[in-house]
Every structure is written in C-alpha cells, then in structure tokens.
C-alpha cells in the first residue's frame, strides 16, 4: 500500500511516530512499546524519524525493518537530506529498499543539535530530495511535511505554500503537519492549501500533552504556538503529573475529535516513544 493509499480507505488512518533509540537496549524497549500499541490500537502504520531534532540517524533502518517484520505493522521511514551527499542518500535508500521498505517521508531535516553548520549538500530542500527519489528510486513512494503555522525559516506564508504545493506536484502521497495545538491554525492552512491546488491528503500531526516542560521545549524548537489559556492551566499544575495528564488528555481528545468531525483523513501521533497517552486518546476516539 502506498502512503497515499492509507488515506483512501474511507475511514480515518491512525499512524504513530517514533524516534530511533540511542542503543540496542532502547531498540528492544521500543519494539515492546510498539507491540503493546499493536495489541491496544492496531496502528495503520508506524513511522520512524531520521535525526529529528538533531538526534541520531542510526538505527532508523533497523527500527522500520523490525517493526514491519516482527510487529507486523506497515512502516514509513523518515529520510532527511540535510548533510548527505547524493551518494550517501542513495546508499541509505538502497538499504531501505533491500529491506522491503519502500515508503519514505522525505524531509530536508533538522539542523545539528549543537548549532554547528551542517555539511553542504546539493539537496538543500525536501523538494530536491523528492526529485532525487522520483528519478533514482521510482519504486519508493514518498510523503512530506507541511506547516499550518508557516515554517519558521520561510520567506513568507505565500512562499511556504508555493513550496508545499511543489511537494504535491512532485508526487507526495500525503503531507503530514508540524505539531499544532489550535485546530483553527490547521483549518486555515488546509483551506489555503486546497485553494492553492494541493489535492493530496493533509494529515494533522498531534502531540499528546503529558509533560509541560517537554511541550515548552518542543514548541520553542519547532515554532508551534502553545495557546496561552492551555499553557496557563497546565502551568498551574506542572508539578502534579496526574493533573497535567488529565488536562493534556482532555485537550488532545477534544482536538482529535474536532479534526475527525471536520474530515481530517487521519491523525499522525508524535508519540515521543511512549504509548500510554496515544492509547488513552485512541480509546476515547473509538469508544
Ligand atoms: P523544506 O520543505 O525544505 O522547507 C524548509 C524551508 O525551505 C521552508 O521555509 C520552505 O518554505 C523553504 N523551501 C522549501 N522548498 C524550497 C525550495 N525548493 N527552494 C527554496 N525554499 C524552499 N527532521 C529530521 O531531521 N528528521 C525527521 O525524521 C523529521 N521528521 C519530521 C516529520 C514531520 C511530520 C515534520 C513536520 C517534520 C519533521 N522533521 C524531521 C523536521 C523537519 O526536518 C524540519 O521542520 C525542517 O526545518 C524542514 O523540513 P522540510 O522537509 O519541511 O523542509
């Protein structure tokens, strides 16, 4: 099934994003988390990041392959061009294809965590990587990222939408959004994307709220807005994990319900390698 096909089945598609752990012990723990998730919510697909937030790129191949073969869940491998030559990228993609992974989320990539300049590459943008994949690896199906609140480095919202449309024109099977907490931002973006001629599924990226400091750090890094009212409610109970979880789940469930009611083709959960919060949300949505 191609990435786009996941969203053409007439029912919402639920996908879960994980990052590759730093060591082998972590990989085994991740596989157990994914197995729990499969038992509880039967994900439509799982994706594994590639150096997101400047973290490790190692083990993406091992994680996607083992989740697909051992846990029996279809996977999508993230692939980021940042800092790679074409030859290096070709080697990574060949490794994926040889292991039976032909679905990729094609990204430019985050800058290195230590703030150093990434090595130069002639594939400076996700669209360059998409062109490369379409030319060199036609057997690979790809999706891409999009930004309801505009990418922080974009020259303007209009310019950002132009490049987002180019991803669709290059054959992206879907576009998964950056995390957002206010659905109004998603609906505004989706309307503008449709007006711009973007016809592929636009999938909301949801980050369950379980820890205030973590959400503050992530929103600072990726430029997503943390609505004041929600932030204040959480801040008041930040030292009380059960109270944070209760407010966080209430918000996330409400957010997901509204998105599905308003025809989102599915939901992509940023799990941060934990399964409890997403299981709670999915149980509420299905129940
Ligand atoms: P691009 O589409 O290249 O956009 C980056 C900027 O360049 C934007 O401002 C855009 O408007 C502009 N632009 C785009 N194309 C062109 C062009 N052809 N010419 C000129 N300007 C252009 N990062 C990782 O490192 N690993 C991951 O696994 C990962 N997974 C992610 C998954 C999702 C769903 C999302 C939303 C993000 C993920 N990221 C990941 C983060 C992502 O790499 C960063 O947000 C990065 O800053 C931009 O990536 P992009 O693919 O959107 O880049």
Image (cartoon, rainbow, N blue to C red):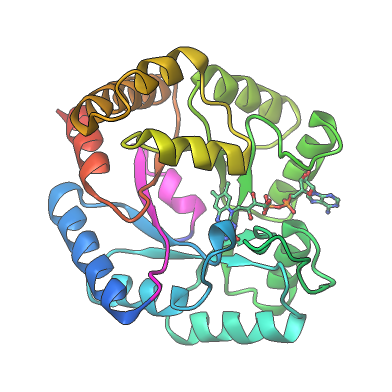
Q: How many dots with numbers?
A: 0
**Which residue sits at x=57%, y=21%?**
187
Q: Quadrant of the N terminus?
A: bottom left
Q: Give the vertical position of 57 relative to 263 (above or below).
A: below
Residue at 28% over, 64% down: 73
- In the picture provided, is 226 more to the left or to the right than 223? left
Within the image, what quadrant is residue 278 found in? top left
In this rendering, would 8 be left or right of 287? right
Q: Which image quadrant for residue 264?
A: top left
* Viewer-nearest residue: 247 or 281: 247
Q: Position of residue 64 (x, y in %)?
A: 39, 72
- Residue 25 in sight in this render: yes
Please state the extent of the stretch shown in magenta in the rendering.
Answer: 3-22
Residue 279 versus residue 170 in the image, above or below: above
Q: Residue furthest front?
A: 239
- Give 66 or 225, whichever is nearer the viewer: 225
- Residue at 71%, 39% in the rendered image: 151
Q: Residue at x 34, y 27 (%)?
A: 252
21 drawn magenta: yes
Whether residue 206 is visible: no
Q: Eyeballing the image, is 23 above or below 20?
A: below
Looking at the picture, how far across and down is residue 109, in whole percent?
65, 60
Q: Is residue 13 magenta?
A: yes
Q: Position of residue 55 (x, y in %)?
A: 53, 65
Residue 269: x %, y % from top left: 38, 44
């Amino acid at each position: 099934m191609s990435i786009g096909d996941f969203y053409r089945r007439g029912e919402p598609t639920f996908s879960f994003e994980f990052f590759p752990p730093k060591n082998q012990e972590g990989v085994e723990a991740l596989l157990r988390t994914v197995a729990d998730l499969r038992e509880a919510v039967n994900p439509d697909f799982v994706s594994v990041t590639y150096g997101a937030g400047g973290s490790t790129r190692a083990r993406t191949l091992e994680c996607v392959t083992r989740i697909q073969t051992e846990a029996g869940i279809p996977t999508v491998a993230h692939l980021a061009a940042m800092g790679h030559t074409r030859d290096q990228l070709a080697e990574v993609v060949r490794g994926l294809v040889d292991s039976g992974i032909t679905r990729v989320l094609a990204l430019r990539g985050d800058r290195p965590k230590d703030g150093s300049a990434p090595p130069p590459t002639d594939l400076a943008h996700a669209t360059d990587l998409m062109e490369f994949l379409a030319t060199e690896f036609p057997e690979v199906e790809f999706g891409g990222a999009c930004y309801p609140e505009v990418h922080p480095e974009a020259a303007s919202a209009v310019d950002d939408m132009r490049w987002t449309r180019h991803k669709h024109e290059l054959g992206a099977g879907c576009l998964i959004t950056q995390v957002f907490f206010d659905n109004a931002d998603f609906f505004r973006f989706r309307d503008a994307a449709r007006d711009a001629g973007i016809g592929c599924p636009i999938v909301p990226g949801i980050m369950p709220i379980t820890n205030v400091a973590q959400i503050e750090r992530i929103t600072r890094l990726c430029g997503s807005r943390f609505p004041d009212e929600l932030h204040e409610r959480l801040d008041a109970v930040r030292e009380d994990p059960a109270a944070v979880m209760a407010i966080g789940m209430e918000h996330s469930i409400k957010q997901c319900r509204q998105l599905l009611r308003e025809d989102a083709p599915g939901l992509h959960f940023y799990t941060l390698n934990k399964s409890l919060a997403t299981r709670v949300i999915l149980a509420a949505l299905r129940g």
